[in-house]
Image (cartoon, helix red, strand yellow):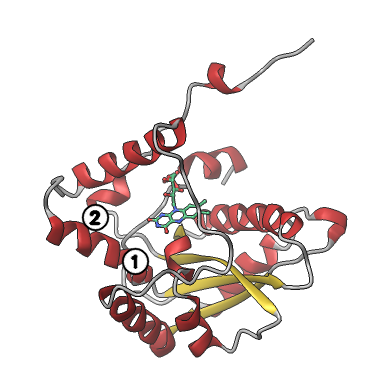
Amino acid sequence: MEILEAILRRRSIRKFLPEPIDREILTNILKISRRAPSSVNSQPWEFTVVQGAILNDLRAENISKYRSGAPAETELSTSYWPKDSIFRERQVEIAKQLFSSMDIGREDTEKRTAWIERGFRYFDAPAAIMITYDKVLSPRGPLMDIGGAVQTICLAAVQYGLGTCIAEQGVIYSSVVRDHTNIPDTKKLAISIAVGYPDWDFPANQVVSNREDIDHIIHWVQ
Ligand SMILES: Cc1cc2nc3c(=O)[nH]c(=O)nc-3n(C[C@H](O)[C@H](O)[C@H](O)COP(=O)(O)O)c2cc1C
């Protein structure tokens, strides 16, 4: 597959088939992702691949924490999009697209809650990759570098017919992840990626998110 085709084909997948993924395929994807660039070639990323019974435990505990109203425990400052900003508008726009595809109405609390819980279940993916970096590092370098590695993982996954959803939700309850994965205290939990074979019959998997007009974001200076 051509690189441009993979870039254009990638999209967030929020429901997967139950089929497991061969360990060799996951290893290849992560091997390839190591080719992402990083400041001073520091390669700050580490991957914890969670599957099987342990992943099911994570799903169940995330859900019970969410239902108990527990506050977020993210290890990086929580993402924030100011009200009345273009960023917030874009967030609302993708939510509308996804909810309309799933027939979730504005006031339908039950369906909305079910949607949020899907994220806490890693979208029922057969695998979730937790990405960590060493706490001795200041976040700026690793987060930029991990961004490149994450996109490389998502693109390599497309080549194997796999889908992905990068998910902050998957690391919101960091104590749940830590309790089951032996991630050492010396590492910071940056983000999770759900991976699996897409269920193309799921309406939200057909949504193509919008992008800003190129003329609004290029500034030519010469
Ligand atoms: C850092 C990051 C965190 C994200 N966290 C979530 C999440 O918690 N739940 C979710 O459903 N999607 C999450 N996404 C997916 C974005 O919503 C998605 O990338 C965006 O809407 C663009 O859609 P696309 O990936 O289909 O192109 C996240 C994406 C990124 C890059």
Please provide percent x and percent y for residue 18.
32, 74
Residue that carries the numbered disc 1 in the rendered image: 123
Instruction: Tell me: 7 left or right of 163.
Output: right
Is label 2 or label 1 in front?
Answer: 1
Residue occupying image coordinates x 34% and y 58%: 14
Please provide percent x and percent y for residue 198.
35, 60
Viewer-closest of 29 and 105: 105
Please provide percent x and percent y for residue 105.
13, 46
Instruction: Tell me: 108 left or right of 52.
Output: left
Viewer-closest of 129 and 90: 90
Name the amino acid type tagged 2.
Phe
| 22 in relation to 100, above or below | below
Residue occupying image coordinates x 30% and y 76%: 63
Residue 47 badge: none
Where, by quadrant of the figure, is residue 41 drawn?
Answer: bottom right
Where, by quadrant of the figure, is residue 92 drawn?
Answer: top left
Label 1 beta carbon less than 8 Å to ligand 1:
yes
Residue occupying image coordinates x 37% and y 87%: 57
Give how far apart the Cα atoms at labels 2 and 1 are: 11 Å
Instruction: Tell me: 87 left or right of 44.
Output: left
Name the amino acid type tagged 1.
Phe
